[in-house]
Amino acid sequence: MSRKYFGTDGVRGRVGEHPLTVEFALKLASSAARVLAPKGGTVLVGKDTRISGYMFESALEAGFVASGVNVMLIGPLPTPGIAYLTKRFECDFGVVISASHNPYEDNGIKFFDRNGGKLTDEIEAQIEQYLDEPPVTRSSSELGRATRVDKSRVRYQEFAMSTVPGLDLSGFKLVIDCANGAGYKVGPRILADLGAEIVPIGSSPNGRNINLNCGSTSPSLLQLTVPGVQAQAGIALDGDGDRLVMVDNLGRTVDGDQLLYIIARDRKKKGLLKGPVVGTVMSNLGLEHSLQKEGIEFRRAKVGDRYVMELLKETGGTLGGETSGHLLALDHTTTGDALICALQVLAIMKETGSSLAELAAPMPKYPQVMENVRVAKKIDPFSSTQITEAVARAEAKLAGTGRIVLRPSGTEPVIRVMVEGRDEKLVREICRELAGTVAAAAEQKVAVG
């Protein structure tokens, strides 16, 4: 079943432009209620700190209440916190108002099922089928109720800390960058409750500064602050708290691939690792090689945490993620959780007495070079003999020391050419040659077509 509005992470776009309008949000709430709670029920609604969140929160509340669904409004809370509390409070489903790492001008609406998992494509398609119908308004005796449950966020804080039993961060000085987003309250409180001395930055949201020169997508201030205050490490969240990038005591970033390696290696040593570790086609080759040295199987999924999740479930794995820091630890959570994954790394630092830099050091990061080739017409790069022959020649040059990824963009007329390997000069040369070949082949396709 095709979907018109739902993407890989709910409905997302520019506020005020279709579909991110108040009218659409109200219709979406009514449609979702018909599918997810047709006989009434309860929904938990949370959000990040964007100024438009108030508007969409009110519209969703109206649509749900009119449909006979009780609404629990919890305010700003990381996406994984809403996923957890949806299940904990035995709600029929949960809703997050957020555009994650996007700028404040954007927003989005995504859903969780009663178990805190993402909806299937089929259920999202069912919801879309009702969008053209007028919103439901039940009689007064059948309307839902709305209640504020802001203080219940402490339940998520307690849960996050329970994933690292007995962890005492006394003696640790940590800088946490909350991206002026959904984790600005719970993030610092969790670390402080565990005994750490904290230096919070990106923790003063004003509705417009979410992800602005801060957070996991822009950690430069964190990189300066950590060595500046002589902290052991820095933690950077994104706007909705599901992505994690860390900074070592020297101010160097430790990305999702490196964090995945640190956690996987520790779990392997303790006999706690189940199934393969799952990354994506864009995960650094250094991660794959380093895990192989530890005797850990590594699998690659398509780009997107949804596809990482699918492959983990298919293979019985519990640990996976993306270079961006969207990490999945399914033995603890049902979705990506930056704070819980940060606690796993801090626990390893505490237990081993090793610095973050020392834990990340065994994994080399191979140079990756990517060029975006604009095309007039969308093509399958592997349907061209010219391209496949060029790839074969390039792979022979790499001689097993690198890899090549050709990936059509799903959102724009672009083919992404990525080459990775140990020799940066050779990688750049091959990427430039392949990009030229792809551009020429694409022009030929247009001319023939």
Image: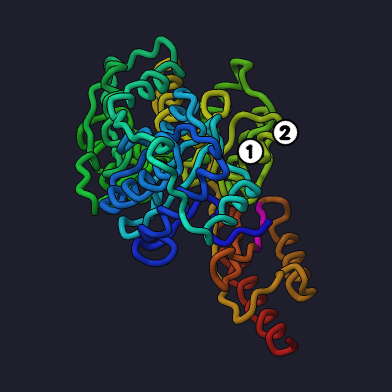
Confirm whether residue 223 shows in the render: no
At x 34%, y 13%, the residue is 168
Question: In the rendered view, does 361 fall on the left or right side of 183?
Answer: right
How many other residues sit within 10 Å of disc 1, few (<14), some (14-19) or many (≥20)? many
At x 32%, y 22%, the residue is 154
How did the renderer colour the structure? rainbow
- On the image, which quarter does residue 104 sit in? bottom left
Closer-to-camera residue (299/284):
299
Tell me which segment is drawn in magenta. 402-406
Report the residue marked by disc 2.
315
How many other residues sit within 10 Å of disc 2, few (<14), some (14-19) or many (≥20)? some
At x 60%, y 81%, the residue is 376
Report the residue marked by disc 1.
278
Q: Position of residue 201 (x, y in %)?
A: 23, 39
The answer to the question of whether label 1 and label 2 lie on touching residues, with beta carbons closer than 8 A, is yes
Kind of residue at badge 1: Val
At x 61%, y 72%, the residue is 435
Q: Secondary structure at mark 2?
A: helix
Frontmost of labels 1 and 2 is: 2
- On the image, which quarter does residue 342 sit in? top left
Q: Earlier in the sequence, mark 1 or mark 2?
A: 1
Closer-to-camera residue (304/226):
304
Q: Secondary structure at mark 1?
A: strand
Q: Quadrant of the N terminus?
A: bottom right
Confirm whether residue 347 shows in the render: yes
| 126 in magenta | no
Kind of residue at badge 2: Thr
- CA distance separating discs 1 and 2: 9 Å
The secondary structure that dominates the magenta segment is: strand
Q: Position of residue 84 (x, y in %)?
A: 46, 28
Q: Quadrant of the C terminus?
A: bottom right
